[in-house]
Amino acid sequence: MLELAYIDPGTGSLIIQTAIAAAIAVPLFFRHQIGRFLSVVRRRGDEDKPSAPLHDSTRGR
């Protein structure tokens, strides 16, 4: 029965390589998604604020 649980070295290294790649790729993927989300939120926050006047009437006096 234990003979069926045998994993050859090629399969074992493939499993380890996949685990390492996933451990690196998942945080990088979510970092990009979080960055996109934060940029959208920041842009929406800027739209809510009143914009600066086009010219300053106190200048030139």
Image: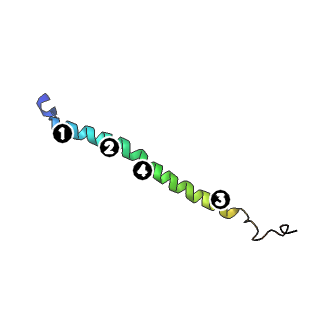
In the picture, the disc for residue 11 is 1
Q: Secondary structure at mark 1?
A: helix
Res 1 visible:
no
Q: Earlier in the sequence, mark 3 or mark 1?
A: 1
**Residue bearing mark 3:** 45
Q: Earlier in the sequence, mark 3 or mark 2?
A: 2
The three-letter amino acid code for the residue at tag 4 is: Phe
Question: Distance between the Cα atoms at labels 1 and 2?
Answer: 15 Å
Packing grade of label 3 (10 A; few <14, some 14-19, many >=20) is few
Residue drawn at x 16%, y 38% is 10
Quarter-of-image position of residue 47:
bottom right
The three-letter amino acid code for the residue at tag 2 is: Ala
Question: Distance between the Cα atoms at labels 4 and 2?
Answer: 12 Å
Q: Secondary structure at mark 3?
A: helix
Q: Are circles 4 and 1 on residues that touch, CB within 8 Å?
A: no
Residue drawn at x 66%, y 61% is 46
Residue 53 picture location, percent across and down: 76, 68
Q: Earlier in the sequence, mark 4 or mark 1?
A: 1
